[in-house]
Amino acid sequence: MKLVIFCCLVVLVLSTFLSTVQYVAAELLSPPTDAQITVKIDKDGYNRGDIMIVSGAVKSVVNNVPLTIQILDPDNNLVHIEQILVAADGRFSLPIRIDGSLWRIPGDYTLVVQYGFKHVSAVTHFQFEQTSTPIASSFNVKDLSSGQNFDLNYTITGGQVKSMVIDPSDISLVVQVDSKNSGTLHLQVPRLLLDAKKPGNADESFLVFVDDNEITSFHEGTSDYGYRYLDIPIANGDSKIEIIGTIVVPEFENVSSLVLVLAVGLVTVFTVFSKTRMNLSIVKTV
């Protein structure tokens, strides 16, 4: 009898022990449940060509684990996806341009951010209204100081461009627009017309003002040797956009000096050539 009771106690203890081990093992294998993530966007609605600013933070950072951003249309079709690494403190921020052939359906769109495990995610919604057709064109910009002309290519949604002019005194490009809706002005700025440089010739960020108020929500694309590419958000009623750099097209005096030097050089060459021909003629006569 005692042996039977002892065996039952052993079985009970082993059963309890194994259950505890299995529970602990399950806890160790499960992803952390306290990891959290937050996300927000800068507006509730966007048109084609707009720049969406996505920002947020994750609570627990894991090295080299990317954050995945997905955007789904009203039919749950994927229209945008990309991955970024979060900062050391867990924060993240990036601009997303609302454009491309996949953006076809107006309505309620879903933005999902996911970090590591599927349950570490956050969702937000926004409206996409394709009410504005992009206008692509080119504006001839003349610098009054130098007399040089540049064709500045642009695309605008939500309005139209009325004028563009260089202001050498402020080292800036001033764009007058007539905006009826929210949209974006995409500019292809020639470096020879306007540029922004740091000491050592590295690119510096432009300063951008909309109706005399500085904005930081503009986005600069990958620039190349000849151009700087800017996406500037505009809203209904905006009329003046000013892009300030550090280098503007050379002053007229410098161009005039160059022309004068070239002219003097050509006259000198022509004079020497004429004298040489005259001397050769005299020698032949003798």
Image: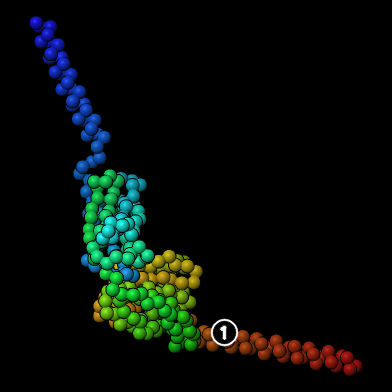
Q: What residue occupies the far left of the structure in this picture? A: 1
Q: Position of residue 112 (x, y in %)?
A: 26, 55
Give the residue drawn at x 34%, y 59%.
Answer: 80
Q: Which of the 4 image quarters holds residue 248?
A: bottom left
Secondary element type, mark 1: helix
Q: What residue occupies the far right of the structure in this picture? A: 286
Q: Position of residue 171 (x, y in %)?
A: 39, 79
165 above or below 102? below
5 above or below 139? above
In the rendered image, the quadrant that contains the C terminus is bottom right
What's the amino acid at mark 1? Leu
Q: Which of the 4 image quarters holds residue 20?
A: top left
Q: Position of residue 56 (x, y in %)?
A: 25, 56
The residue identified by callout 1 is 258
From the viewer's perspective, is 46 left or right of 102? left
Q: Which of the 4 image quarters holds residue 137?
A: bottom left
Q: Position of residue 272 (x, y in %)?
A: 73, 88
208 above or below 28? below
Please state which of residues 4 and 228 is positioned toward the viewer in this rendering: 4
Q: Is residue 239 visible?
A: yes
Please state which of residues 217 and 280 is positioned toward the viewer in this rendering: 217
Give the residue drawn at x 78%, y 88%.
Answer: 276
Q: Is residue 216 visible?
A: no
Check disc 1: other Cα within 10 Å, few if <14, some if 14-19, many if 20+. few
207 above or below 53? below
Give the residue drawn at x 20%, y 44%.
Answer: 34
Give the residue drawn at x 44%, y 88%.
Answer: 144
